[in-house]
Each structure stands twice: as structure tokens, then as C-alpha cells.
Amino acid sequence: MKNDWKWEGLDPTERQIAELLVRGKSNAAICAGLSLSKARVQDYIKRILIKTGADTRRAAIALLIEERATLTVLSMLDEAPDGVIIIQDRLVKFANKRLRDMLGYDLEEMEELPFVDLMAPGSRSTTTKQYELRMQGEPFSTSYAIRMLCKDGQEKDAVMASAGQIGYSGRPAILGIVFPTAEK
């Protein structure tokens, strides 16, 4: 899914320097390793700070490390045998291949889609209530039956299980696992 990934906003040299920063390299080591002047390396680091939105070198490194870990997890989740969805601000931020196939959507079609649009009308209020409870940190059902709405309008029975609230791109989100129930 598209996102405002910091690594993607860096040009190739900035990315190379960011990689060295993440590995704990000093400015002097970066200068020597890339045959760049101290001033040039400092300029690149300033650009990295601006592009990541970080105030300090340490904050930029932390953001880049967190983002890399997130991308690694998303890559693994994309291959999961059950549907996986991440919802943030009531919008789909991530839906794995299994869930997209189950509902008949392409990657681009699900991105930023209001999550209730994936629920059959009769399941929307329950699913919205569960989402709100999770986001508020209140007790919630760990799994519940839902009817999902496919792109073609067909409804499918499923079970939604949730790990509850997670951090995603530095903000709260909900991670859900969707288990299709047997076809009738």
C-alpha cells in the first residue's frame, strides 16, 4: 500500500548516507567511505532531517529504523494465509494479498478505502463499535462474526479477530485478522 515512507523520499545518496547513519557510522566514517567532504555530508544529513521531519539525527535514525521494521513486517503479512488488515483513522492502510483476493480488490482500490465499505450493511455498526472500543483502549471482543462486502457486491461470512491497537507510521491503528468461514 502506498504510504508516506521516509526511505522512499530520499534520493540515492541520501539513502546511502541514511543507511550508514542507521548502522551507527560517524560523519568522519561516512566522509571516508563515500569520498565526500565533511560539509557535503552535513548537507546531506540536514536534507535527511528535513525529509524525515526529524529534529535531530538520533530522531531521524529512530524513524528510519522503525519504518524499516514496519516494511519488513508488512512484507511478511502480505504472504499470510489469512486476511490481514490495518485500519487507521477509519481507513484501510494495509490489506494483504489474501484479503484483497478474498474480496476481489486490487491493491490500489483498497488503499485509503473507509473500512466500513468492506462490511455488509448489517455488520457495519458492530464493526465500527469494535473499532472505536479498540482505539479508546476499552475492553473488546477478540473475535466476532461479520459479513464482508466484496467488490462485486457479494457478501461473505467471516470472523474478525483483532490484536487490538498497534502503532503504524508512528500513530495508533488497529490490526485485524480475517478468517473466512466455510462456504455454504
Image (spheres, rainbow, N blue to C red):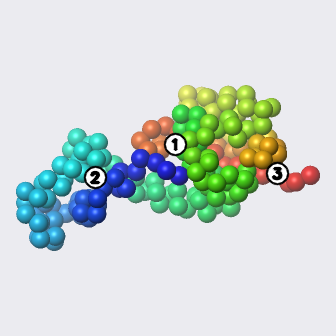
Note whether 149 is above or below 108 in the view shown.
above
Q: Secondary structure at mark 1?
A: strand
What's the residue at 50%, 57% (across, down)? Answer: 73
Identify the secondary structure beneath mark 3.
Answer: loop
- Crowd band around label 1 with a 10 angstrom C-alpha radius: few (<14), some (14–19), many (20+): some
Figure quadrant of residue 96:
bottom right
Amino acid at dot 3 = Thr
Q: Residue at x 31, y 50 (%)?
A: 62
Q: Is residue 72 left or right of residue 114?
A: left
Disc 1 to disc 3: CB gap under 8 Å: no
Residue assigned mark 2 = 61
The image shows residue 111 at horizontal and vertical percentages of: 57, 46
Q: CA distance from mark 2 to mark 1?
A: 21 Å
Q: What's the residue type where badge 1 is placed?
A: Ile
Q: Position of residue 82 (x, y in %)?
A: 69, 57
Question: Callout 2 environment at 10 Å: few (<14), some (14 to 19), or many (20+)?
Answer: many
Residue 97 in percent (x, y) is at 64, 58
Q: Residue at x 62, y 47 (%)?
A: 110
The circle drawn on residue 181 is 3
Residue that label 1 marks: 166
Amino acid at dot 2: Ile
Determine whether 32 is above or below 18 in the image. below
Q: Is residue 58 visible?
A: no
Residue 63 circle label = none
Please indicate whether residue 60 sits to the left or right of residue 75 in the image: left
